Every structure is written in C-alpha cells, then in structure tokens.
C-alpha cells in the first residue's frame, strides 16, 4: 500500500458541485420526460387510463422536484467541504510556512 498525499487543487475540484448539478439535471429531465405526453396523445384513452397517467405524472414530477432539491443540497455540501479544505490548506500553509 502506498502513501497518498492530498492537496487541495481548485482547478480539479472546484467545479465538482457544478458537475454534480449538470449530471443531476440530465437525470431530472429524463424523469420529467417519462410522463410528458400532450393532451392530444391522451385523446383516445379511457378516463381511468387518463386518471392513472395523471397520477403517475404528478408522482414523477414530485420525484423530479425532490431530486432537484437534493442535488442542490448535495452541491451546497460539496461547496462547503471544498471551502473547508481550502481554508485548512491556507491555515496549514500559514502555520508551517508552506
């Protein structure tokens, strides 16, 4: 097992929150698209089928909303972690002259 040294590198880690949000947006857009038929597509459907479709659409949209909220929270958490890492690196550099 080799020793691994970590140093904060804003050029490689700083964009991680934005990358997380971009990936999450792809997934969220897919989830929203699962039940996005227009009303013309539903014209020949029975009332019970339309009701079930609407129920599922609302459920999936709520899921997508929840996913977006959680992705935002995760990105904020990553920003906090990166900020703490940068602060620690600066503190160590000041304390140890590096």
Image (spheres, rainbow, N blue to C red):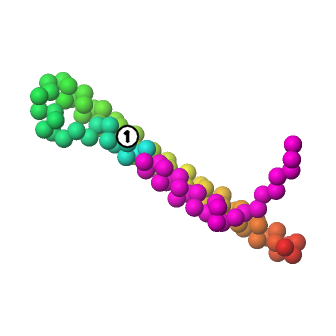
Q: Is residue 3 magenta?
A: yes
Rendered location of residue 10, percent (x, y): 66, 66
Q: Quadrant of the N terminus?
A: top right
Say which quarter of the image contains residue 49. Answer: top left
Is the residue 18 above or below the residue 49 in the image?
below
Q: Is 18 left, or right, of 65 in this rendering?
A: right
Front residue of 22/47: it is: 22
Please report the residue visible at 42 percent of the width from the left and 48 percent of the height from the top: 26
Rendered location of residue 19, percent (x, y): 53, 55
Q: Is 55 left, or right, of 11 in this rendering?
A: left
Please report the residue visible at 27 percent of the width from the left and 32 percent of the height from the top: 55
Say which quarter of the image contains residue 32. Answer: top left
Q: Quadrant of the C terminus?
A: bottom right
Residue wearing tag 1 = 31
Q: Is residue 65 magenta?
A: no
Rendered location of residue 28, percent (x, y): 41, 45
Q: Is 68 left, or right, of 78 in this rendering?
A: left
Q: Is residue 62 visible?
A: no
Rendered location of residue 82, percent (x, y): 66, 61
Please report the residue visible at 19 percent of the width from the left and 41 percent of the height from the top: 38
Using a 10 Å C-alpha cutoff, classify the residue at mark 1 as few (fewer than 14 neighbours), some (14 to 19) or many (20 or more): some
Q: Label 1's element?
A: helix
Say which quarter of the image contains residue 79. Answer: bottom right
Front residue of 28/88: it is: 28
Front residue of 98/72: it is: 98
Is the residue 92 above or below the residue 67 in the image?
below
Q: Is 44 left, or right, of 62 in this rendering?
A: left
Count of numbered badges drawn on the protein: 1
Q: Is residue 34 visible?
A: yes
Q: Give, as a single range, the part of the protein colored magenta.
A: 1-26
Please report the residue visible at 30 percent of the width from the left and 32 percent of the height from the top: 56
């Amino acid at each position: 097992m080799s020793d691994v040294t970590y140093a904060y590198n804003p050029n490689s880690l700083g964009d991680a929150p934005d990358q997380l949000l971009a990936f999450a947006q792809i997934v969220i857009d897919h989830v929203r698209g699962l039940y996005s038929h227009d009303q013309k597509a539903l014209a020949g459907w029975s009332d019970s089928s339309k009701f079930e479709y609407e129920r599922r659409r609302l459920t999936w949209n709520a899921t997508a909303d929840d996913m977006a909220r959680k992705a935002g929270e995760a990105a904020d958490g990553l920003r906090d972690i990166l900020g703490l890492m940068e602060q620690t690196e600066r503190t160590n550099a000041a304390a140890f002259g590096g």
